[in-house]
Image (tube, grey):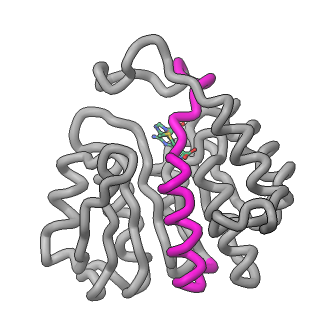
Amino acid sequence: MPENAHRPLRDTAVTAVIDRLASARQSPPDDPRARLERDPHEYSEYGFSISPEQGDLIYVLCRGLRATRIVECATSVGMSTLYAAAAVRDNGGGTVIGSEIVPAKVATAERNLATAGLSAYVDIREGDARTTLRDLGGPVDFALIDGWLGTEPSLARQVIELVAPRLRVGGYVMNDNAEPDFLDYIRDPANGFLSVTLPLHGGTELCVKVTASPKSS
Ligand SMILES: C[S@@+](CC[C@H](N)C(=O)[O-])C[C@H]1O[C@@H](n2cnc3c(N)ncnc32)[C@H](O)[C@@H]1O
């Protein structure tokens, strides 16, 4: 049985980076979720990365969608980006538009993607996602909203309002933090989504766009 036969993503150049990041995973001494006004720059050493199960799901969904355009808030050190970029490459090409406010993390993510051989498939935009994701340049197949907890309106809510009009019907959104105002948006039938809470990483919301939203153009 070849190495990685049990994983949907089998490219060993990519999984070697994923496995290295997973084994270096560490948690900050304080619980950043306990302090809503925390500054992301104070946590530049911490990835807060998605779980391997979430990553496998991103890869499988994006392959099934034949995704070529993926958006991500946020990138951190690139764990989720590795799965998404491998999917667009394996679909024949495309771009993952990432976003990350901490410059040191952008540099680390770019190094990790280069080591995995995936640099050609990413555009990681440094800065506040609420600004850097305003111009997505075209329709989007998949969005990961894995941001930063804060007071409402949450980052997740502001980003879904930016991204939803650009998401194609049949496209998916995955959200990691279950921000209440994000869930309010996604569960409002007027916004055109169906969603389900999956038992991954303490609760992952998987949402599919079923009708064009009023703001679509
Ligand atoms: C949960 S982590 C993302 C993990 C990443 N998806 C992964 O799996 O590796 C959240 C990231 O959001 C970044 N962040 C916080 N506020 C942001 C903002 N306004 N714009 C862009 N990134 C932000 C933080 O620096 C942090 O790296």
Asked if 154 appears above or below 66 in the picture, the reply is: above
Q: Is residue 160 visible?
A: yes
Q: Position of residue 113 (x, y in %)?
A: 78, 52
- What residue do we see at 52% from left, 84% from top? 65
Query: In this image, 89 relative to 133: left or right?
Result: right
Say whether residue 209 is magenta.
Answer: no
Q: Choose top left, top right, bottom left or bottom right for residue 214.
A: bottom left
Q: Position of residue 154 (x, y in %)?
A: 28, 43
Say whether residue 44 is magenta.
Answer: yes
- What residue do we see at 59% from left, 40% from top? 76
In the image shown, does 215 or 117 lie closer to the viewer?
117
Q: Position of residue 73 (x, y in %)?
A: 49, 52
In the image shown, does 4 or 145 lie closer to the viewer?
4
Query: In this image, 14 relative to 171: left or right?
Result: right
Asked if 47 appears above or below 1 in the picture, the reply is: above
The range drawn in magenta is 42-68
- What residue do we see at 39% from left, 67% from top? 173
Quadrant in which the N terminus appears: bottom right
Asked if 14 appears above or below 68 in the picture, the reply is: above
Q: Is residue 96 visible?
A: no
